[in-house]
Amino acid sequence: MISKVFGRIFDFFASLQLAVGLILTLAVVLGTGTVYESKYGAHVAAQLVYRSWWMQVLLWVFILNVAAAAISRLPWKKQHVGFLITHLGIIILLMGGWVQQRRGVDGILALAPGESGRMVRMDEAALYVFRTEPGKNYELVVDETLDFDLRYPSSKVRTFDLAGEEKQIKILNFYPKATRNVEAESMPKGKGVPALKFTLSGSRATFSDWMFLQNEKGTTNELGPAVLRFVKDKPDLSKAPEKPTMYFYLEGNAELSPKVAVARAGEKFRELGRIPTNKTTPLGWMDFELTLGDYRPAAIPRASYSPMEKPIPGFDGYQVVEAELAGQKLWLELGASGQISAGNYLYYVQYARRQVDLKFDVALKSFKIDYYEGTVRPKEYSSVVEVAGQEHLISMNEPLKHGGFTFYQASYEMDEATNKPKASVFSVNYDPGRAIKYFGSLMMCLGIISMFYFKPKYSGTTKALMRRKENEE
């Protein structure tokens, strides 16, 4: 009885019907993955399709099907050689893909001329928590991948334990695309920075935001062609700006509301003096008017986020998570960090792209762009890098291989102020399954050739017909 059940199960896995069904299913899945990749990006396609658990099940069932089909031919004969080699090649090829998926690296390394780096930025986001106490170094206590569905917000609570203690950190909310609202929270003198809230209103648009004087260089806010700067000391107002520019400056006294100077592009500045809060002042920029809504001598920014309800032209939104540790909550944008104090410990919480250490430095010596003659359209771009004391050229058709990694010239970053390249971007790939996949592909080719070589010259039916014809003669 048991042998019959086992035989039926084996026959099912070895059947041609299962093979055809799997191939058709995989074709549909791969087509779906292509659609997802074009609509949402490669990371979403990998997350929802290529690296999903059900895709892994499909591939392992396919491997079982191929292996069972080969075993079903026992006892093997000479004409089975090509068939067996081909099926073994398929299994090896799929195993190579599995190794690459589990241990491979596919990320980005961006370098400015003269800069060196060794950390490759991956697509997947992770949560890091570092812990310290007075007189001690930071210790990593949480390192977890946050694999959210990037299409939708999520309020499903995720909990992670802190190493070495009973505390936990919770992820309360995730927004793949969010809008940010910043407010100023007043603080005692010496524990905050000057902050002002401005409103620019006109017939075409209205802008309102907080600006915080975080350091000696001041803060800049760009609104379309206009530039707003909040600085501590009175700036040099003798030079005409290239863009419409407005200065807020304290001129020594942080307790009083800031003074204002404004200028059109190419014209001299007009000093408007100190503007009282909630008073509207014409600027001379078309019909725009300035209102200083609030001013606080000492404050800190407090940001809150809400899901983006509809697309905003030119704005992709912020990818954020809300975390809670020791009863304290904080919002973290992707790539940002925050601090939480609890008891004797200070916790440094970071939400960032996962990084992989190359174990060697890559230094960008120079970057070059060739344009199509008479145009500003790039024809080709290349970089000269230094690795292990030797210089190498990386171009669009000439990658660099070193230490098991392959570096491709992927793109470059432009400086909006100078309209010149400011960084070269490399795609970095490490595929430990590449040799396995090459070997599997070679075996498939040899197997297909062998199937023709060992194929009988005549089939059984043909031989029977030939014997019958000979007897009739």
Image (cartoon, rainbow, N blue to C red):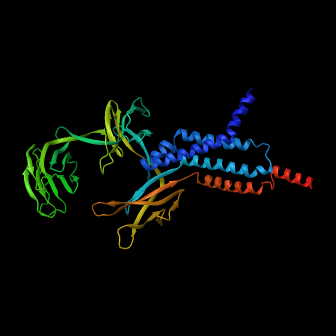
Q: Residue furthest bottom?
A: 373
Q: Quadrant of residue 182?
A: top left
| Residue occupying image coordinates x 34% and y 30% | 326
Image quadrant where one finds the N terminus: top right
Q: Quadrant of the C terminus?
A: bottom right
Left or right of 410, for residue 301: left
Q: Position of residue 110 (x, y in %)?
A: 40, 57
Left-right relation of 23 to 425: right
Q: Position of residue 293 (x, y in %)?
A: 13, 43
Q: In this view of the protein, which residue sits in the foreground, 374 or 365?
A: 374
- Residue drawn at x 65%, y 49% as measured from the top left: 90
- Side (left or right) of 382 relative to 271: right
| Vertical relation: 266 (above or below) 12 | below
| Residue at 85% in and 50% down | 464
Q: Is residue 243 left or right of residue 23?
A: left
Query: Outermost residue toward the front?
Result: 472
Along the viewing direction, whichever of 266 and 108 lies nearer the viewer: 266
Against 467, residue 392 (above or below) is: below
x, y percentage for residue 418? Answer: 28, 64
Can residue 102 be seen here? The reply is: no
Picture mark count: 0
**In the image as oriented, which residue stretches furthest toward the top?**
1
Q: Position of residue 308 (x, y in %)?
A: 31, 41
Q: Is residue 268 visible?
A: yes
Residue at 45% over, 64% down:
386
